[in-house]
Amino acid sequence: MDLLIYSDSSSVRLDYVFNHIFHRILGLKITITHDVQFFNQSSSPKINYSKHPFSDELFFYASDLLFEEDIKSQDISFSTHNGIKVFFPCKKGALPFDPFAASFYMLSRYEEYLPHKKDKMGRFLVDGSLAFKNNFLTTPVVDHWIIFIKKILSHHFPNLVFKQHKFSFTNTIDIDNAYAYLEKGFFRTLGATVFDLLKCNFKNIYNRINVLWCQEKDPYDNYAELLRLHHKYKLKTIFFFLLADYGFYDRNVHYLNDKFCANIKTLSSYCEVGVHTSVNSVKFPKNILIEINRLSSIVNKEILCSRQHFLYLNMPSNYRNLLKYGIKYDYSMGFPSHPGFRAGTSYDFYFFDLQSNNMTDLLLYPFSIMDVSLNNYLNLQPDEALDLIKQIIHNTKLVNGNFISIWHNESLSCVDNWKNWDSVYENMIKFTMDV
């Protein structure tokens, strides 16, 4: 059964957000009309999305945002509905706010196209976001707004059949640095040793010597343990490999290193793999294709997934470049410094290029937890981190969404400031299974 939607005029923004909400999430077929007479005469389930109702039909007030084509500062004011923060308020309509305009604002990352402060790397700062400033970063508000819409539709049109969703977990691991000491080459090893001497870090020198002399295992070489956990809990796991040329931020071992390549091949036999596009590729986009081809040649598979190293998102150029070089799925949508829902959702959604005012076929998978955020940015102890992770998982389960986490082989090494974080990782996995 189709849902008929009336709108005063056509809009690519409207098409985008209606496709996401009604088709992709709620599983409904929709027809959009601008013909008032056709709408009024139809006996189909129908809603009116405009400035004014015609009679007693199901009416949602339409803000201007979805019918604009430019990018400008929006008048954002907040209220609360059923305990959830909302904006684009209205005095008439089925809801006290415009859920379609608000959802578009969040999913398109509208605020990241407006003038904003950046960190030292040039990334959008979390404390400049609406979600952080208004204390809803850890709540997938867009998913809740869609539930509001679903409940209203169910009440008015009980014969509508909706798509059913179940909570899911996607486990992702970034390999920024395959080994702590091994396979670095003579000059990098010498330079690191000299640096440790200058810093009087004799423990690091001792560990390096023991690893290089085969007295101890390299602490970052924990791939067998990661695979053991993958099999034990039957996880959907994606490994992202940094295969860039050496640079200030891109410091993995050489992409032709035999040991490294062998590990990549082994992991790709059991798990999905993607490219961890380099920081340098932001400035030199052709490096994306080079890095994709390197991974593809190692695993002998087409590479369709990516995550940006250091989560360096520069809207919209990063995503445009990924599309240009054949990436279909990106897992970079999240903040490096804080857990939560950068786009207000736990569900995957298509990238909307706000500058060109156009929907694309690049599917974005938002993550909500990263190990580095918890330890290095927020300075949480392992037990504190686990409590926060459980809160995020709980919030995701409330909307039957997809919980995506980021961990690194380094953070599961149990050395230095990562001691006891391996237990956080496994307890996180266990908690996802407590439905």
Image (tube, rainbow, N blue to C red):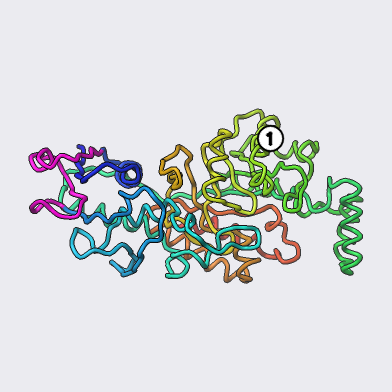
Task: Residue at 62%, 29% (x, y): give it.
Answer: 301
Label 1 crowd (10 A; few <14 / some 14-19 / many >=20): some
Using the rendered view, name the quadrant where residue 239 is placed.
top right
Residue 190 position by quadrant:
bottom right
The location of residue 183, given as percent across then percent down, is: 84, 45
What's the amino acid at mark 1? Ile
Range of the magenta residues? 30-58
The location of residue 276, given as percent across then percent down, is 64, 44
Task: Find disc 1 in the rendering and name its residue.
Answer: 290
In this orientation, which residue lies closer to the viewer: 309 or 123? 123
**Residue at image x 19%, y 40%?**
34
Q: Quadrant of the C terminus?
A: bottom left
| Residue 194 relative to residue 4: left or right | right
Viewer-nearest residue: 204 or 291: 291
Q: Hey, which quadrant is residue 161 in on the image?
A: top left
Percent from the top left, x then y, of residue 328? 52, 37
Q: Secondary structure at mark 1?
A: helix
Residue name at image x 30 percent, y 49 percent? 67
In the image: residue 106, left or right of residue 9: right
Expressed as whole percent of the image width and height from the top left, the position of residue 151 reads 23, 55
Camera-side residue: 240 or 322?
322
How many marks the image carries: the answer is: 1
